[in-house]
Image: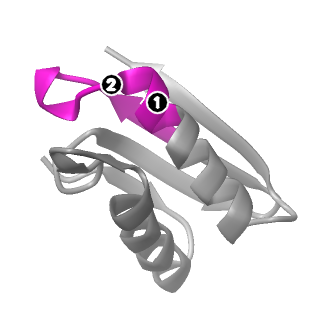
Amino acid sequence: LNPRLEGDPATLQRVLAALDAEATDDAGGIVGRHCVKSLCISEGEAELTLTFPPSCGSGKRLAESAFATLRRLLPDTDVYVLHAT
């Protein structure tokens, strides 16, 4: 279950690593648990789409944590975190 990724490969990998380290709960990070459906980073905009099966724990808290991580890593970028079913 690999997420759909669009953007600079180095930036995508840096962001995914940070999301998995920082957007976590007791069960682990959102990337390792396949909660990331897509991540698209373009000039001035980042869109992260998450899906929250039972293995992803508290969706709202993880989404807020993911948003904060993206804002920190991409300070001059409009950040959108979406929830997909």
Amino acid carrying mark 2 in the image: Ser
User: Picture coordinates of residue 28 (x, y %)?
Assistant: 20, 52
Q: Residue at x 59, y 57 (%)?
A: 69
Q: Quadrant of the C terminus?
A: top left
Residue 53 within the segment the image draws in magenta: yes
User: Picture coordinates of residue 55 (x, y %)?
Assistant: 12, 31
Query: Which quadrant holds residue 38?
Result: top left
Is 76 on the left or on the right of 16, as rendered? right
Distance CA(mark 2)–CA(mark 1): 6 Å
User: Picture coordinates of residue 3 (x, y %)?
Assistant: 29, 50
Q: Residue at x 36, y 66 (%)?
A: 21
Determine whether label 2 and label 1 are within 8 Å by CB. yes
Give the residues in magenta. 48-63
Is 49 on the left or on the right of 26, as rendered? right
Q: Which residue matches tag 1?
A: 61
Q: Which residue matches tag 2?
A: 58
